[in-house]
Amino acid sequence: MQSKATTPEEYIKELPEERKEAVSKIRETILNNIPAGFTETMSYGMLGYVVPHTLYADGYHCDPKLPLPFMNVASQKNFIALYHSGIYADPELLNWFTTEYPKHCKRKLDTGKSCIRFKKIDDIPYELIGELAAKMTVQQWVNLYEKNTKK
């Protein structure tokens, strides 16, 4: 469900009532924990946290006009999705997350190829999302990204 919103505030305003608080809280958690340098924007019709061109001029290899994506949050039809590029590029980070997840949630971890799905709004691990957001600096993400794409 791609949004046409141009700002994060517009995006949240257009969400169904039952999703507004959860997405707002995820957003606030990310903003309070993500390392300096990442920028919040609208990206691919969802909330995005990117490395701006001022810090990484090459941009995203699929479309260099776009900043390098890092995290996204989206309200999908049946769940809220959290996309974290670093978790899929770094097996150590993925292992940390999958080990920590059961300590924060009653439900089984539900992941897709590029997302973590939260189907039950009352069981979103905000603290864990904050820890995940804080785990990788801009420079660490750029280094990992380049290692994986410029082989």
Image: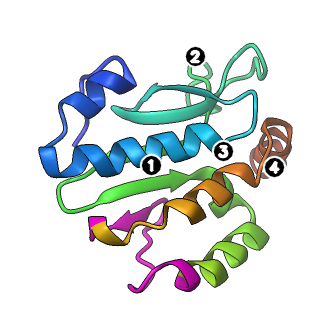
Residue 68: x %, y % from top left: 64, 31
Mark 4 and mark 2: span between their CA atoms?
20 Å
Discs 3, 2 touching: Cβ within 8 Å = no
Which mark's residue is nearer the viewer, 4 or 2?
Answer: 4
What element does badge 3 sit on? helix
Where disc 4 sits, the SS reads helix
Question: Image height check: is 33 above or below 14?
Answer: below
Q: Farthest residue in the top direction?
A: 54
Mark 3 or 2, closer to the camera: 3
Q: Nearer the viewer, residue 149 or 31?
A: 31
| Relative side of 66 to 123, left or right | right
Dot placed on the residue nearer the N-terminal end, 4 or 1:
1
Verify whether residue 114 appears in magenta: yes
Which is nearer the N-term, disc 4 or disc 2?
2
What is the image's colouring? rainbow
Specify the amino acid type for callout 2.
Lys
Magenta highlight range: 102-121
**Rendered residue at 32%/56% (across/down):** 80
Q: In the rendered structure, are the residues bearing label 4 and label 2 in contact, judged by CB atoms less than 8 Å apart?
A: no
Whether residue 82 is visible, yes or no, is: yes
Which mark is nearer the camera, 3 or 4? 3
Q: Quadrant of the N terminus?
A: top left
Residue picked out by circle 1? 26
Foreground label between 4 and 1: 1
Which residue position holds label 2? Answer: 65
Say what amino acid the circle numbered 3 marks: Asn
Mark 3, residues whose alpha carbon is within 10 Å: few (<14), some, or many (≥20)?
some
The circle drawn on residue 46 is none
Question: Does 29 sit above or below residue 129?
Answer: above
Q: Residue 91: x and y, percent?
A: 74, 71
Q: Which of the two labelled residues, at mark 2 and mark 1, occupies the earlier sequence position?
A: 1
Q: Is residue 86 left or right of residue 56?
A: left
